[in-house]
Amino acid sequence: MSYSIESVRKDFPILSRSVNGRPLVYFDNGATSQTPIPVVEAMNRVYYEYNSNIHRGVHTLSNIGTEAFENVRKQVAGFINAAKVEEVIFTKGTTESINLLAYSFGESFLKAGDEIIISGMEHHSNIVPWHLLQKRKNIIIRVIPVLDDGSLDMEAYKALLSDKTKLLSITHVSNVLGTINPVKEMVELAHKYSVPVLIDGAQGIHHEEVDVQDLDCDFYVFSGHKMYGPTGTGVLYGKEKWLTEMEPWQGGGEMIKTVTLEKSTFNDIPYKFEAGTPDYVGVIGLGAAIDYINGIGLDAIREYERELYTYAFDRLSSISKLTIYGTAPHRGSLISFLLKDIHPFDAGTLLDKMGIAVRTGHHCAQPLMDRFSIPGTVRASFGLYNTKEEVDILIDGLAKVRQLFA
């Protein structure tokens, strides 16, 4: 490890607060990570120093804001190694990015009888938009099965690919199982059938190095609030050839070239997909979050988190009558589990009384819960500021939960 965990934790004031009279242990990073001081300060500077609507102004404050906003676009393109800055579109988050694609890509390229492939481990945000498209266009949805260890059935995936397949939409890292899917291999297989690939990177972008050119994916989407940035920010990366041909999703300001009362013509990418005033303050905060990650070093973060994950997995595995869901060979960042005969809501509520924040429930992945015949799980998800000492507190907390239900 090449960074000081003590120094990093000082950047997150919320980590020093108490909850229910106990020091906070925050293991809900898979839902939302905490935000460091430099990100908040960057957003404050916008409001205090140059707040003004961007792109359409000629005055100084608007120009400063526009330059700051567009610099983040360049920053994101570098962070994911996009071939062109124009391939980066700002959205409200992963969910909006996928909905945008389901509408725009679906309306532009899909027709009745066409097939798309998803997996049985997808978040609802990578299922429901395709259901809506299915109702509109009468497409067919095929599903890659999930094996008992939480990995995808790759042989089944290969069998699903055909000339009818028009899109693969797959998660990079499961938000329930922690499974790191072989997305590069899956892209290569899909492209043999000329099938474009969308990768949901919400749980992968800040844990794994993402090089969209190396992956050769056609689309990659992620959220700011899961990578130490502000809520309401996200990114849709798309290859220029697709974005240029896709129809806009929303109409309004900025996404147009000309408007008459009879017709409209549309702006070039990326602006064609950024109707209205964007959350420019949030986007500038997202840029600060990327600066923060780069300042520590993604390699150092990944090394530290993998060591922490291994420690947590080993400690949880040693607890009797505790079942971990997700034991695939390649996994990380989070662990989902159940204590025998104890409902996850009950376990999570009791842990909260001890100051330990975990996520409980189906995690917006009801089909996956049905696959394992469980109502939900307790999920502990880790960030760059979590410690082995906090894992020990979780283990002690689970022991107390067991005692209370004995």
Image (tube, grey):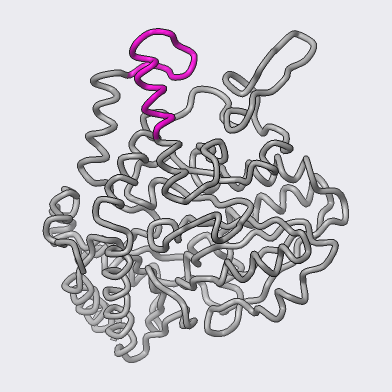
Magenta segment, which residues?
51-71
Q: Is residue 151 above or below residue 213?
A: below
Residue 91 left/right relative to 297: right
- Image quarter hosting the C terminus: bottom left
What's the residue at 28%, 57% (across, down)?
297
Percent x, y for residue 172? 52, 63
- Image quarter hosting the N terminus: bottom left
Percent x, y for residue 268? 64, 27
Q: Is residue 54 magenta?
A: yes
Percent x, y for residue 98? 60, 48
- Residue farthest to the right, as pictured: 113
Residue 196 left/right relative to 315: right
What's the residue at 85%, 63% (across, down)?
163
User: Which picture quadrant has residue 394?
Assistant: bottom left
Viewer-closest of 292 and 278 = 292
Viewer-closest of 245 and 319 = 245
What's the residue at 24%, 26% (across, down)?
45
Percent x, y for residue 160? 77, 72
